[in-house]
Amino acid sequence: MSGILADEMGLGKTVQTIAMLSLLMLCGARGPFLVLAPKSTLCNWAAEFAKWLPQARVLLLQGTKEERQVLIEEMLRPGNFDVVLTSYEMMLRESGEVAKRYWRYVAS
């Protein structure tokens, strides 16, 4: 099933999404999950994951081309993460690598 959370900023979409991923994980869905968000909100997303779902292994896919390449080669492997958190721009730049993966759920 798909769904849309579309309302004004500041009403809790981030926490609702993390809560949904938490529930999925509690029900046995091990991911991996992909979360795409505006670049300006990535630090907030990471902080909210640390606060509300600290057991999730979150991979923040951002940085220079060289930094991203290291993350892709060393960390973007099955079993190394539960959630990949990245921006729309990084998704476009790394679409080949990201598209190779199977994503249980994608939140955008």
Image: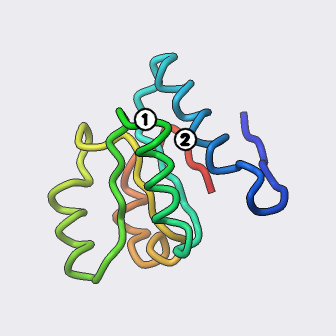
The numbered dot on residue 80 is none
Q: Secondary structure at mark 2?
A: strand
Q: What x and y, as percent, mark residue 21?
A: 54, 35
Q: Badge 2 is on which residue?
A: 105
Colouring rule applied to residues: rainbow
Q: Badge 1 is on which residue?
A: 31
* Direction right: furthest residue: 7
- The numbered mark, 2 or 1, whose residue comes first in the sequence reads 1
Residue beneath the point at 71% across and 48% down: 12
Horizontal side, residue 23 vs residue 55: left or right: right
Residue beneath the point at 63% across and 57% down: 108
The type of residue carrying mark 1 is: Gly
Residue beneath the point at 78% across and 49% down: 5
- Count of marks placed on residues: 2
Q: Secondary structure at mark 1?
A: loop
- Would you place residue 65 above or below residue 94 in this image? below
